Image: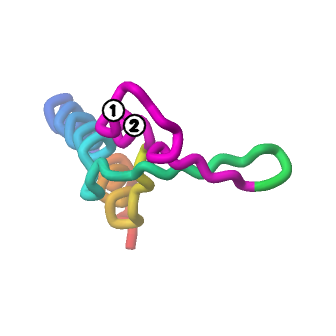
Amino acid sequence: MALSVRRIAQAVVNAVAAIYGGATPESNTVHTVFTGTANATIDANALGLTFGLDAAQEAFDEALTRPEVIAIVQPFVIPTIS
C-alpha cells in the first residue's frame, strides 16, 4: 500500500521532532567517549567553561530510550515493532 506524500511528510516531521525533542530533558553534563582503548568520561561541570552550563548541556546528546527510538522509526517500518 502506497503512502501519501502528506502522510510521509508528517512522519518525517514527527521523527525529527522526536529526535531533537525527546522525552529526556537537556540536562546531561557528562559525556562518555571511547579513547581507542577505554571509555573516558568528560564532565562539563569540571571543565571551567566560560560559555555557560546551558550550552554544555545542549551540546551533550541524551541517549534515546527504546520507546523513543520505536516512536521515531515505526512510521517507516512495516510490520509494527514490539
Rounded to the nearest angstrom, the CA distance separating label 1 from label 2 is: 7 Å
SS class, disc 1: loop
The residue tagged 2 is 56
Task: Report the side of 8 relative to 59 (left or right).
Answer: left
Task: Report the side of 69 relative to 25 (left or right).
Answer: right
The boundaries of the magenta stretch are 39-60
Measuring from the top left, give residue 34's x and y in whole percent.
72, 48
Q: Nearer the viewer, mark 1 or mark 2?
A: 1
Measuring from the top left, give residue 12's x and y in whole percent.
27, 36
Question: From where the camera sits, is residue 38 visible?
Answer: yes
Residue 16, above or below 31:
above
Q: Is residue 68 magenta?
A: no
Residue found farthest to the right: 37
Question: From where the camera sits, is residue 3 visible?
Answer: no
Residue 80: which disc? none
Between 36 and 70, the residue placed more toward the observer is 36
Task: Report the side of 16 relative to 44 (left or right).
Answer: left
Between 45 and 12, the residue placed more toward the observer is 45
Q: Is residue 55 magenta?
A: yes
The residue tagged 1 is 52
